[in-house]
Protein backbone atom coordinates (compact mmCIF):
# COMPACT_ATOMS: atom_id res chain seq x y z
CA UNK A 1 0.00 0.00 0.00
CA UNK A 2 2.87 2.37 0.85
CA UNK A 3 4.50 1.85 -2.56
CA UNK A 4 1.15 2.49 -4.26
CA UNK A 5 0.81 5.81 -2.42
CA UNK A 6 4.31 6.79 -3.53
CA UNK A 7 3.49 5.99 -7.16
CA UNK A 8 0.24 7.94 -6.93
CA UNK A 9 2.06 10.96 -5.47
CA UNK A 10 4.60 10.84 -8.28
CA UNK A 11 1.78 10.52 -10.80
CA UNK A 12 0.07 13.62 -9.42
CA UNK A 13 3.36 15.48 -9.72
CA UNK A 14 3.92 14.44 -13.32
CA UNK A 15 0.31 15.28 -14.20
CA UNK A 16 0.60 18.66 -12.53
CA UNK A 17 3.68 19.43 -14.60
CA UNK A 18 1.55 19.00 -17.71
CA UNK A 19 -1.37 21.18 -16.59
CA UNK A 20 -2.21 24.47 -18.25
CA UNK A 21 0.00 27.15 -16.70
CA UNK A 22 -2.44 30.02 -17.16
CA UNK A 23 -6.23 30.05 -17.52
CA UNK A 24 -6.27 32.73 -20.23
CA UNK A 25 -3.22 31.53 -22.14
CA UNK A 26 -3.04 27.76 -21.67
CA UNK A 27 0.22 26.07 -22.41
CA UNK A 28 0.62 23.00 -24.59
CA UNK A 29 -0.66 19.78 -23.11
CA UNK A 30 1.84 17.40 -21.60
CA UNK A 31 3.19 14.71 -23.91
CA UNK A 32 4.74 11.90 -21.92
CA UNK A 33 8.07 10.19 -22.51
CA UNK A 34 9.97 7.14 -21.35
CA UNK A 35 11.67 9.36 -18.76
CA UNK A 36 8.28 10.17 -17.24
CA UNK A 37 7.56 6.48 -16.84
CA UNK A 38 10.93 6.00 -15.15
CA UNK A 39 10.10 8.88 -12.79
CA UNK A 40 6.92 7.01 -11.89
CA UNK A 41 8.98 3.94 -11.06
CA UNK A 42 7.50 1.97 -13.95
CA UNK A 43 9.15 -0.56 -16.23
CA UNK A 44 8.08 -1.28 -19.80
CA UNK A 45 6.71 -4.67 -20.79
CA UNK A 46 5.70 -5.66 -24.32
CA UNK A 47 2.09 -5.97 -25.43
CA UNK A 48 2.85 -9.51 -26.57
CA UNK A 49 4.01 -10.38 -23.04
CA UNK A 50 0.85 -8.89 -21.51
CA UNK A 51 -1.41 -10.85 -23.85
CA UNK A 52 0.62 -13.92 -22.97
CA UNK A 53 -0.28 -13.44 -19.33
CA UNK A 54 -3.93 -14.00 -20.27
CA UNK A 55 -3.29 -17.13 -22.30
CA UNK A 56 -1.04 -18.51 -19.55
CA UNK A 57 -3.74 -17.87 -16.94
CA UNK A 58 -6.63 -19.37 -18.90
CA UNK A 59 -4.96 -21.85 -21.24
CA UNK A 60 -5.40 -19.79 -24.43
CA UNK A 61 -8.21 -17.68 -25.86
CA UNK A 62 -10.26 -20.40 -27.57
CA UNK A 63 -13.23 -21.28 -25.42
CA UNK A 64 -13.00 -18.06 -23.39
CA UNK A 65 -15.28 -15.93 -25.56
CA UNK A 66 -18.66 -16.43 -23.93
CA UNK A 67 -20.25 -13.74 -21.77
CA UNK A 68 -23.81 -14.95 -21.22
CA UNK A 69 -23.45 -17.87 -18.80
CA UNK A 70 -22.33 -16.18 -15.60
CA UNK A 71 -19.06 -14.92 -14.21
CA UNK A 72 -17.48 -18.36 -14.12
CA UNK A 73 -17.26 -18.26 -17.94
CA UNK A 74 -16.26 -14.60 -18.24
CA UNK A 75 -12.48 -14.57 -18.24
CA UNK A 76 -10.71 -11.53 -16.80
CA UNK A 77 -7.14 -10.93 -15.68
CA UNK A 78 -6.65 -8.07 -13.23
CA UNK A 79 -3.40 -6.16 -13.14
CA UNK A 80 -2.98 -6.05 -9.38
CA UNK A 81 -4.30 -7.70 -6.25
CA UNK A 82 -7.91 -8.82 -6.08
CA UNK A 83 -10.15 -7.07 -3.59
CA UNK A 84 -12.63 -8.93 -1.35
CA UNK A 85 -15.48 -7.55 -3.47
CA UNK A 86 -14.06 -9.26 -6.54
CA UNK A 87 -14.64 -12.78 -5.26
CA UNK A 88 -17.89 -12.73 -7.25
CA UNK A 89 -15.81 -12.82 -10.44
CA UNK A 90 -15.00 -16.50 -10.26
CA UNK A 91 -12.71 -16.54 -13.28
CA UNK A 92 -10.81 -13.38 -12.27
CA UNK A 93 -7.09 -13.88 -11.61
CA UNK A 94 -4.75 -11.26 -10.20
CA UNK A 95 -1.30 -10.41 -11.52
CA UNK A 96 0.38 -8.51 -8.66
CA UNK A 97 3.74 -8.22 -10.45
CA UNK A 98 2.13 -5.81 -12.93
CA UNK A 99 2.07 -3.09 -10.26
CA UNK A 100 5.20 -1.43 -11.65
CA UNK A 101 4.66 -2.17 -15.37
CA UNK A 102 3.50 -0.18 -18.37
CA UNK A 103 3.01 -0.79 -22.07
CA UNK A 104 3.74 1.67 -24.87
CA UNK A 105 2.36 1.57 -28.40
CA UNK A 106 1.58 3.64 -31.46
CA UNK A 107 -1.99 4.67 -32.24
CA UNK A 108 -3.30 2.56 -35.16
CA UNK A 109 -7.05 3.36 -35.10
CA UNK A 110 -9.33 6.39 -35.14
CA UNK A 111 -12.95 6.98 -34.14
CA UNK A 112 -13.25 10.18 -36.21
CA UNK A 113 -15.69 8.61 -38.71
CA UNK A 114 -17.62 6.68 -36.06
CA UNK A 115 -16.93 3.09 -37.11
CA UNK A 116 -14.66 2.34 -34.14
CA UNK A 117 -16.41 3.32 -30.93
CA UNK A 118 -14.81 4.07 -27.55
CA UNK A 119 -11.79 1.99 -28.48
CA UNK A 120 -8.18 2.87 -29.20
CA UNK A 121 -5.85 0.27 -30.71
CA UNK A 122 -2.11 0.55 -30.15
CA UNK A 123 0.85 -1.44 -31.53
CA UNK A 124 4.40 -1.74 -30.19
CA UNK A 125 6.08 -3.93 -32.80
CA UNK A 126 5.38 -7.16 -30.89
CA UNK A 127 1.57 -7.14 -30.78
CA UNK A 128 -1.48 -4.88 -30.71
CA UNK A 129 -4.20 -4.40 -28.09
CA UNK A 130 -7.52 -2.60 -27.74
CA UNK A 131 -7.89 0.04 -25.01
CA UNK A 132 -11.53 0.47 -23.93
CA UNK A 133 -11.85 4.20 -23.30
CA UNK A 134 -14.29 7.00 -24.14
CA UNK A 135 -15.85 8.73 -27.13
CA UNK A 136 -14.03 11.35 -29.21
CA UNK A 137 -10.61 9.74 -28.90
CA UNK A 138 -9.41 11.26 -32.16
CA UNK A 139 -9.32 14.63 -30.36
CA UNK A 140 -6.74 13.31 -27.89
CA UNK A 141 -4.79 10.73 -29.91
CA UNK A 142 -3.44 11.33 -33.39
CA UNK A 143 -3.68 9.02 -36.37
CA UNK A 144 -3.25 10.46 -39.89
CA UNK A 145 -3.00 7.61 -42.36
CA UNK A 146 -2.52 9.95 -45.30
CA UNK A 147 0.62 11.46 -43.77
CA UNK A 148 1.51 8.27 -41.85
CA UNK A 149 1.59 10.19 -38.57
CA UNK A 150 0.78 8.67 -35.20
CA UNK A 151 1.42 9.13 -31.52
CA UNK A 152 2.86 7.07 -28.68
CA UNK A 153 0.47 6.02 -25.91
CA UNK A 154 1.59 4.88 -22.47
CA UNK A 155 -0.62 2.63 -20.33
CA UNK A 156 0.09 2.11 -16.63
CA UNK A 157 -1.30 -1.37 -16.01
CA UNK A 158 -1.85 -1.37 -12.26
CA UNK A 159 -5.55 -1.63 -11.41
CA UNK A 160 -6.73 -2.26 -14.97
CA UNK A 161 -8.29 -5.43 -16.37
CA UNK A 162 -7.33 -7.55 -19.37
CA UNK A 163 -10.66 -8.91 -20.59
CA UNK A 164 -11.98 -11.14 -23.33
CA UNK A 165 -15.05 -10.54 -25.46
CA UNK A 166 -15.67 -13.22 -28.05
CA UNK A 167 -11.90 -14.02 -27.92
CA UNK A 168 -10.85 -10.41 -28.61
CA UNK A 169 -8.61 -9.19 -25.79
CA UNK A 170 -8.78 -5.62 -24.50
CA UNK A 171 -7.62 -3.54 -21.55
CA UNK A 172 -10.19 -1.56 -19.61
CA UNK A 173 -11.95 -1.04 -16.30
CA UNK A 174 -13.59 -3.48 -13.92
CA UNK A 175 -15.91 -6.27 -15.10
CA UNK A 176 -19.52 -5.21 -15.54
CA UNK A 177 -22.89 -6.76 -16.19
CA UNK A 178 -26.16 -5.58 -17.60
CA UNK A 179 -29.28 -6.31 -19.60
CA UNK A 180 -29.19 -5.73 -23.35
CA UNK A 181 -32.15 -4.48 -25.35
CA UNK A 182 -33.39 -8.03 -25.88
CA UNK A 183 -33.62 -8.54 -22.12
CA UNK A 184 -30.64 -10.91 -22.10
CA UNK A 185 -28.24 -10.73 -19.17
CA UNK A 186 -24.67 -10.14 -20.33
CA UNK A 187 -21.45 -10.40 -18.35
CA UNK A 188 -18.52 -8.34 -19.60
CA UNK A 189 -14.94 -9.15 -18.68
CA UNK A 190 -14.02 -5.48 -18.52
CA UNK A 191 -15.61 -2.08 -19.07
CA UNK A 192 -14.85 1.21 -20.76
CA UNK A 193 -13.04 3.96 -18.87
CA UNK A 194 -15.77 6.37 -19.92
CA UNK A 195 -14.56 9.30 -17.85
CA UNK A 196 -11.51 10.90 -19.55
CA UNK A 197 -10.22 12.17 -16.21
CA UNK A 198 -10.27 8.66 -14.79
CA UNK A 199 -8.74 7.21 -17.94
CA UNK A 200 -5.87 9.70 -17.78
CA UNK A 201 -4.73 8.22 -14.47
CA UNK A 202 -3.57 5.19 -16.46
CA UNK A 203 -3.46 6.21 -20.14
CA UNK A 204 -1.03 8.96 -21.17
CA UNK A 205 -0.56 10.60 -24.59
CA UNK A 206 3.03 10.46 -25.75
CA UNK A 207 5.08 12.22 -28.36
CA UNK A 208 4.13 12.25 -32.03
CA UNK A 209 5.79 9.62 -34.19
CA UNK A 210 5.85 8.41 -37.78
CA UNK A 211 3.83 5.36 -38.63
CA UNK A 212 6.32 3.09 -40.37
CA UNK A 213 5.49 0.74 -43.22
CA UNK A 214 6.25 -2.17 -40.88
CA UNK A 215 3.48 -1.01 -38.54
CA UNK A 216 0.95 -2.10 -41.16
CA UNK A 217 0.78 -5.80 -41.93
CA UNK A 218 0.52 -6.36 -45.67
CA UNK A 219 -1.53 -9.40 -46.72
CA UNK A 220 -2.24 -10.76 -50.19
CA UNK A 221 -3.38 -13.92 -51.91
CA UNK A 222 0.03 -15.54 -51.54
CA UNK A 223 0.61 -15.10 -47.81
CA UNK A 224 -2.76 -14.88 -46.04
CA UNK A 225 -2.56 -18.46 -44.74
CA UNK A 226 0.72 -17.79 -42.94
CA UNK A 227 0.57 -14.04 -42.24
CA UNK A 228 -2.59 -13.99 -40.12
CA UNK A 229 -3.17 -15.78 -36.84
CA UNK A 230 -3.88 -15.21 -33.17
CA UNK A 231 -0.75 -13.08 -32.72
CA UNK A 232 -2.01 -10.57 -35.30
CA UNK A 233 -5.36 -9.85 -33.62
CA UNK A 234 -5.75 -6.11 -33.09
CA UNK A 235 -3.15 -5.19 -35.71
CA UNK A 236 -3.64 -2.74 -38.56
CA UNK A 237 -3.76 -4.95 -41.66
CA UNK A 238 -3.98 -4.07 -45.34
CA UNK A 239 -5.64 -6.74 -47.49
CA UNK A 240 -4.30 -6.23 -51.00
CA UNK A 241 -6.22 -7.47 -54.03
CA UNK A 242 -9.06 -8.99 -52.03
CA UNK A 243 -12.40 -9.87 -53.65
CA UNK A 244 -15.90 -8.99 -52.46
CA UNK A 245 -18.18 -12.03 -52.49
CA UNK A 246 -21.84 -12.03 -51.59
CA UNK A 247 -23.20 -15.10 -49.84
CA UNK A 248 -26.69 -16.53 -49.98
CA UNK A 249 -27.87 -13.98 -52.56
CA UNK A 250 -27.33 -13.73 -56.31
CA UNK A 251 -24.82 -11.65 -58.23
CA UNK A 252 -25.99 -8.13 -59.11
CA UNK A 253 -25.62 -8.77 -62.88
CA UNK A 254 -26.31 -12.50 -63.18
CA UNK A 255 -29.06 -13.95 -61.00
CA UNK A 256 -28.03 -17.45 -62.10
CA UNK A 257 -24.53 -17.03 -60.66
CA UNK A 258 -24.35 -19.27 -57.57
CA UNK A 259 -23.58 -17.29 -54.40
CA UNK A 260 -20.72 -18.07 -52.06
CA UNK A 261 -21.80 -20.18 -49.09
CA UNK A 262 -21.10 -19.16 -45.52
CA UNK A 263 -20.54 -22.34 -43.58
CA UNK A 264 -23.66 -24.50 -43.74
CA UNK A 265 -25.87 -21.41 -43.72
CA UNK A 266 -27.01 -19.41 -46.71
CA UNK A 267 -26.99 -16.20 -44.74
CA UNK A 268 -27.76 -13.12 -46.83
CA UNK A 269 -24.43 -11.34 -47.12
CA UNK A 270 -23.97 -8.43 -47.54
CA UNK A 271 -26.41 -7.69 -44.79
CA UNK A 272 -27.51 -5.71 -41.85
CA UNK A 273 -27.69 -7.86 -38.74
CA UNK A 274 -29.97 -7.53 -35.72
CA UNK A 275 -28.11 -9.04 -32.77
CA UNK A 276 -30.28 -7.82 -29.91
CA UNK A 277 -32.74 -10.67 -30.27
CA UNK A 278 -30.60 -13.47 -28.88
CA UNK A 279 -30.15 -15.32 -32.16
CA UNK A 280 -29.05 -13.01 -35.03
CA UNK A 281 -31.68 -11.97 -37.54
CA UNK A 282 -30.49 -11.11 -41.01
CA UNK A 283 -31.73 -8.85 -43.76
CA UNK A 284 -30.29 -8.28 -47.21
CA UNK A 285 -28.89 -4.77 -47.64
CA UNK A 286 -26.39 -3.35 -50.12
CA UNK A 287 -24.81 -0.55 -48.14
CA UNK A 288 -22.01 -0.72 -45.60
CA UNK A 289 -24.50 -0.55 -42.73
CA UNK A 290 -28.13 0.37 -41.98
CA UNK A 291 -29.17 3.84 -40.82
CA UNK A 292 -32.80 4.60 -41.65
CA UNK A 293 -35.27 6.63 -39.57
CA UNK A 294 -32.89 6.62 -36.61
CA UNK A 295 -32.62 2.83 -36.60
CA UNK A 296 -28.94 1.98 -36.84
CA UNK A 297 -27.74 -1.59 -37.40
CA UNK A 298 -24.28 -2.83 -38.17
CA UNK A 299 -23.47 -4.54 -41.43
CA UNK A 300 -21.10 -7.26 -42.56
CA UNK A 301 -19.77 -7.75 -46.08
CA UNK A 302 -17.69 -10.76 -46.99
CA UNK A 303 -14.34 -10.48 -48.75
CA UNK A 304 -12.15 -13.40 -49.67
CA UNK A 305 -8.98 -14.80 -51.15
CA UNK A 306 -10.40 -18.34 -51.31
CA UNK A 307 -13.78 -18.50 -53.06
CA UNK A 308 -14.13 -22.24 -52.47
CA UNK A 309 -14.05 -21.83 -48.69
CA UNK A 310 -17.41 -22.30 -46.95
CA UNK A 311 -16.34 -21.71 -43.34
CA UNK A 312 -15.65 -18.19 -42.12
CA UNK A 313 -13.45 -19.60 -39.35
CA UNK A 314 -10.91 -20.75 -41.92
CA UNK A 315 -8.27 -18.59 -43.61
CA UNK A 316 -9.34 -16.79 -46.74
CA UNK A 317 -12.78 -15.40 -45.78
CA UNK A 318 -13.21 -12.21 -43.73
CA UNK A 319 -16.10 -9.96 -42.78
CA UNK A 320 -15.86 -6.19 -43.17
CA UNK A 321 -17.77 -4.95 -40.12
CA UNK A 322 -19.37 -1.51 -40.26
CA UNK A 323 -21.38 0.29 -37.57
CA UNK A 324 -24.73 1.89 -38.30
CA UNK A 325 -23.33 4.93 -36.49
CA UNK A 326 -20.42 5.35 -38.89
CA UNK A 327 -20.37 8.29 -41.29
CA UNK A 328 -20.27 5.86 -44.21
CA UNK A 329 -23.05 3.50 -43.07
CA UNK A 330 -25.36 4.21 -46.02
CA UNK A 331 -22.66 4.35 -48.69
CA UNK A 332 -23.02 1.72 -51.46
CA UNK A 333 -20.85 -1.37 -51.25
CA UNK A 334 -18.76 -2.82 -54.09
CA UNK A 335 -20.27 -5.20 -56.61
CA UNK A 336 -20.00 -8.93 -56.09
CA UNK A 337 -16.61 -9.91 -57.53
CA UNK A 338 -15.03 -6.45 -57.23
CA UNK A 339 -11.34 -6.50 -56.28
CA UNK A 340 -9.74 -3.83 -54.12
CA UNK A 341 -7.71 -3.10 -51.00
CA UNK A 342 -9.06 -2.99 -47.44
CA UNK A 343 -7.19 -1.47 -44.48
CA UNK A 344 -8.48 -2.02 -40.96
CA UNK A 345 -8.12 -3.60 -37.55
CA UNK A 346 -8.00 -7.40 -37.70
CA UNK A 347 -10.34 -8.96 -35.16
CA UNK A 348 -12.20 -12.11 -34.23
CA UNK A 349 -15.73 -12.79 -33.05
CA UNK A 350 -16.71 -16.15 -31.61
CA UNK A 351 -16.56 -18.40 -28.60
CA UNK A 352 -14.16 -20.95 -30.07
CA UNK A 353 -11.35 -20.50 -32.57
CA UNK A 354 -12.65 -23.09 -35.03
CA UNK A 355 -16.13 -21.50 -35.05
CA UNK A 356 -15.16 -17.84 -35.28
CA UNK A 357 -15.78 -15.02 -37.74
CA UNK A 358 -12.68 -13.01 -38.58
CA UNK A 359 -13.56 -9.35 -38.95
CA UNK A 360 -12.04 -6.15 -40.28
CA UNK A 361 -12.98 -2.74 -38.84
CA UNK A 362 -11.92 0.21 -40.99
CA UNK A 363 -11.33 3.61 -39.41
CA UNK A 364 -12.24 5.50 -42.60
CA UNK A 365 -14.26 5.08 -45.78
CA UNK A 366 -11.02 5.88 -47.63
CA UNK A 367 -9.61 2.59 -46.34
CA UNK A 368 -12.27 0.61 -48.23
CA UNK A 369 -10.39 1.16 -51.46
CA UNK A 370 -12.40 0.08 -54.50
CA UNK A 371 -12.71 1.73 -57.91
CA UNK A 372 -15.74 4.06 -58.21
CA UNK A 373 -17.00 2.06 -61.18
CA UNK A 374 -16.96 -1.09 -59.03
CA UNK A 375 -19.46 0.32 -56.53
CA UNK A 376 -23.14 -0.58 -56.87
CA UNK A 377 -25.39 1.98 -58.48
CA UNK A 378 -28.57 3.16 -56.82
CA UNK A 379 -30.57 1.33 -59.48
CA UNK A 380 -28.81 -1.95 -58.71
CA UNK A 381 -29.33 -1.47 -54.99
CA UNK A 382 -33.03 -0.76 -55.49
CA UNK A 383 -33.49 -3.78 -57.73
CA UNK A 384 -31.78 -6.26 -55.40
CA UNK A 385 -33.00 -5.07 -51.99
CA UNK A 386 -36.04 -7.06 -50.78
CA UNK A 387 -38.99 -4.94 -49.72
CA UNK A 388 -38.84 -6.48 -46.24
CA UNK A 389 -35.33 -5.09 -45.74
CA UNK A 390 -36.68 -1.54 -45.70
CA UNK A 391 -38.67 -2.38 -42.58
CA UNK A 392 -36.31 -3.99 -40.07
CA UNK A 393 -37.80 -5.74 -37.04
CA UNK A 394 -38.30 -3.49 -34.05
CA UNK A 395 -37.91 -4.87 -30.56
CA UNK A 396 -40.84 -4.80 -28.18
CA UNK A 397 -40.86 -1.51 -26.32
CA UNK A 398 -38.73 0.58 -28.66
CA UNK A 399 -36.15 0.75 -31.36
CA UNK A 400 -33.03 1.81 -29.47
CA UNK A 401 -30.59 -0.42 -31.30
CA UNK A 402 -26.97 0.32 -30.49
CA UNK A 403 -25.42 -1.33 -33.51
CA UNK A 404 -23.07 -3.19 -31.18
Image (cartoon, rainbow, N blue to C red):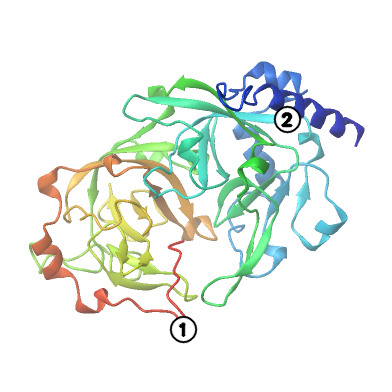
Q: State how far apart marks 2 and 1 are (Cα).
A: 47 Å
- Asked which secondary structure carries label 1, the reply is loop
Q: Residues within 10 Å of mark 1 (few under 14, many from 20)?
A: few
**Image quarter of residue 262:** bottom left
Above or below, 284 against 122 in this view is below
Residue 80 in picture, x, y percent from top left: 79, 42
SS of the residue under disc 2? strand
Residue 101 - label: 2
Front residue of 369 and 260? 369
Q: Is residue 355 left or right of residue 386?
A: right
Q: Quadrant of residue 26?
A: top right
Task: State left or right for residue 151 relative to residue 254.
Answer: right
- Say left or right for 217 vs 99: left
What is the x, y in percent for residue 64?
A: 62, 57
Which residue of the protein is positioned furthest toward the right in this rendering? Answer: 2
Which residue is label 1 attached to?
396
- Of badges 2 and 1, nearer the viewer stands 1
Which of pointers 2 and 1 lies earlier in the amino acid sequence? 2
Amino acid sequence: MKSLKIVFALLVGVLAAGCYNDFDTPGPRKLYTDDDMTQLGLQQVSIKTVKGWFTDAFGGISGTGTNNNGWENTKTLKFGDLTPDESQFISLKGRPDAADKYIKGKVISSDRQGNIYKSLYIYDGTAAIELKLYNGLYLDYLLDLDKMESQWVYVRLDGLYLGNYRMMLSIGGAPSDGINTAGTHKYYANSNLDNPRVAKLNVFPGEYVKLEASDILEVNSSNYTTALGEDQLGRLVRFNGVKIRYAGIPNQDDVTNPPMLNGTFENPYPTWIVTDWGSPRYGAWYRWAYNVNNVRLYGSVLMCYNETETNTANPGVYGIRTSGYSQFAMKPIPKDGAVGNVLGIYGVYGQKWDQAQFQISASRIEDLDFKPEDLLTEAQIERMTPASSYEPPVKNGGDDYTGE
